[in-house]
């Protein structure tokens, strides 16, 4: 699966509709300091459902909306559309392309769309969960993060590699199953106590 295109409108330093197309292989975005390169990766993260304003370098989520500058008026809403190549489609999502759209206006109202149809954030996360592109999948590595990875302890680095290899979701499932087992054991112990008392 690869990112085919990214369309931004009213997002950070992109007041007007701007479409970036990506071929397969490596794409490089170059530009002077402050020209908006990191805003492009912020847009990817945001469209994937990022909920923390800090992760997209803002104090509040509305900070992603173009705030005006250089004679261009502020916008009332930010919109990002991300189109992913889905190959021959998956069981969950049989389409060859997946379009994910996110919109937020200044009043705080927002919406997500999957291939044009309005949906909930959980639906977006569900579609992404098996693609390796979810927000916890390290598909976006921010500046400074690389240094943190290089200098991290071997155990932490192993966790990162496991996440990237898709083991993270199995780890979470195992943890959920363990908690369920513990709860079941507690219930069993209680039932045995009651039985013993009744004897
Ligand atoms: P560097 O190479 O220094 O890391 P960069 O190319 O990655 O820079 P960004 O950090 O993506 O640049 O963009 C910074 C620019 O985006 C700043 O000029 C900032 O004013 C502008 N910007 C960020 N948020 C908004 C917003 N909500 N409205 C208007 N402009 C914004």
Image (spheres, rainbow, N blue to C red):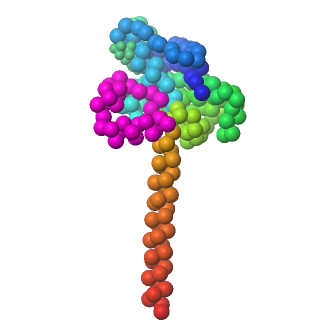
Residue at the (30%, 34%) spot, across then down: 152
Q: Nearer the viewer, residue 43 or 85?
A: 85
Residue furthest front in the image: 154
Residue 32 location, x and y as percent? 37, 7
Task: Judge whether residue 144 is colored magenta.
Answer: yes
Task: Judge whether residue 195 is colored magenta.
Answer: no
**How many numbered discs, if any?**
0
The quarter of the rendered structure image containing the N terminus is top right
- Asked whether the viewer can see residue 75, the reply is no
Q: On the rendering, which quadrant does ligand 1 occupy? A: top left
Residue furthest bottom in the image: 199
Q: Nearer the viewer, residue 46 or 172?
A: 172
Q: Is residue 133 above or below residue 14?
A: below
Residue 110 location, x and y as percent? 52, 33
Side of 156 relative to 196 (left or right): left
Write the start and end of the magenta stretch as one range. 137-165
Q: Is residue 181 above or below residue 174?
A: below
- Asked whether the viewer can see residue 183, the reply is yes
Side of 36 relative to 117 (left or right): left
Side of 21 relative to 180 (left or right): right
Q: Is residue 152 above or below residue 180?
A: above
Residue at the (55%, 39%) spot, across then down: 129
Residue 111 location, x and y as percent? 55, 33
Residue 47 location, x and y as percent? 52, 28
């Amino acid at each position: 699966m690869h990112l085919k295109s990214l369309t931004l409108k009213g997002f950070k330093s992109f007041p007007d509709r701007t479409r970036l197309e990506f071929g397969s292989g490596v794409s490089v975005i170059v530009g002077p300091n402050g020209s908006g390169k990191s805003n492009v990766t912020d847009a990817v993260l945001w469209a994937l459902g990022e909920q923390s304003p800090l992760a997209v370098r803002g104090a509040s989520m509305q900070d992603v909306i173009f705030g005006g500058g250089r004679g261009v008026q502020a916008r009332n809403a930010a919109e990002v559309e991300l189109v992913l190549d889905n190959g021959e489609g998956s069981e969950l999502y049989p389409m060859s392309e997946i379009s994910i759209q996110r919109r937020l206006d200044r009043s705080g109202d927002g919406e997500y769309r999957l291939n044009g149809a309005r949906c909930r954030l959980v639906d977006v996360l569900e579609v992404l969960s098996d693609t390796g592109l979810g927000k916890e999948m390290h598909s976006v590595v921010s500046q400074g993060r690389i240094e943190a990875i290089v200098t991290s302890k071997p155990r932490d680095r192993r966790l990162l590699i496991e996440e990237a290899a898709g083991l993270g979701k199995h780890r979470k499932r195992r943890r959920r199953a363990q908690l369920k087992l513990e709860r079941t054991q507690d219930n069993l112990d209680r039932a045995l106590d009651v039985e013993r008392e009744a004897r």
